[in-house]
Structures are given as structure tokens and as C-alpha cells.
Image (spheres, grey):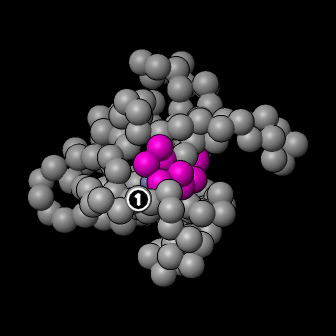
Amino acid sequence: MTDTNFLTLTDQDWRERLDDMSYHVLREAGTERPGTGRLLNEERSGSYSCKACGAELFEAGTKFEAHCGWPSFYESKEGSVRYIEDRSLGMVRTEVRCANCDSHLGHIFPDAPQTPTGNRYCMNSVSLTFTPEDGSGRVDG
Ligand SMILES: [Zn+2]
């Protein structure tokens, strides 16, 4: 983690840091098409970080197959995300953002009774970077 204060970056800064799709999802709260994310079927041990700022968000052990087309987790690292009521698209949903840089990650739904928390963090793969425990190199979602 660097000393960059990500909350002060301008829109132009973000455009230079991120590819177009990542920018659209992370900074414009877009959504990738389901079933397309590179990290959707990632099953190795390791950790998932915010692609925008590098903050650790999820342990691979909390990832589960939710059959929704997006990488899903049942628990975030403590203090790593914040929650915002989202009333777009005629629904009331809870948006999940990175607590460190305020970038959009996805939404959380209380519809996963098969998990220890009952929650499904429905994340955009393109918002995440995976760091495998086996040291074989990071994978951008
Ligand atoms: Zn972040």
C-alpha cells in the first residue's frame, strides 16, 4: 500500500490509472456482463484486492459459487468496504464500495443462506485483483 490519498484523485487521474472497462465499473458504478469476469472461476487460495487502490478486500476462502455470473464472497475483510443505499433501476439495493478509495465494487444481497454469514457480496471481477498464495503472480479481473 502506498501513501497515495486515493480520495483526492481527480477524474482525470483515475482515467490515466485504469483501463476503460475498469474505469467504467469502479468510477462510474458500471456492471460487467455476467459470466465474463476473469476471476469468476478462480479457485486458488489467496486474496482479492481492490484493482483501483490495492487494498485487500476478500480472502479466497470466503468465495463461493453463487451461479449469478459474478465472483461472490460471503464476507469482506473487516473495515475494507463501505455500504451505500442504491435506489437506481427502480430497486433498493446496497452498493459496496472500497473503504480506502471509494471505488464501486458491486452490491451485497442477503440471499446466501448456504454460507456462514448469509450474505452474497456480488462483485465485479474487473474491480478486483487476485493475488494467489502460490506466488505465481497477480491476476487482474
Ligand atoms: Zn480501493
Q: Which residue is identified by label 1? A: 5
Spot occupied by residue 76 in the image (x, y as percentages of width and height) = 41, 34
What is the span of residues highlighted in magenta in the rendered image? 98-107
**Is residue 62 toward the left or the right of residue 9 in the image?**
left
Residue at left 53%, top 32%?
Answer: 120
- Residue 52 in which image quadrant: bottom left
Q: Residue furthest left?
A: 135
Residue at left 61%, top 24%?
Answer: 110
Dot 1 amino acid type: Asn
Nearest to the observer: residue 21 or residue 85: 85
- Whether residue 33 is visible to the viewer of this picture, yes or no, is no
**Is residue 83 toward the left or the right of residue 99 in the image?**
right
Spot occupied by residue 136 in the image (x, y as percentages of width and height) = 14, 63
| Mark 1 secondary-structure assignment | loop
Nearest to the observer: residue 60 or residue 10: 10
Nearest to the observer: residue 104 or residue 10: 10
86 up-or-down from 114: above or below: below
**For the C terminus, which image quadrant?**
bottom left
Classify 10 Å Cα crowding around label 1: few (below 14), some (14-19), many (20 and above).
few
Spot occupied by residue 3 in the image (x, y as percentages of width and height) = 30, 59
- The quarter of the image that holds ligand 1 is bottom left
Q: Is residue 101 magenta?
A: yes
23 up-or-down from 77: above or below: below
Count of numbered circles on the image:
1
Residue at left 60%, top 57%?
Answer: 34
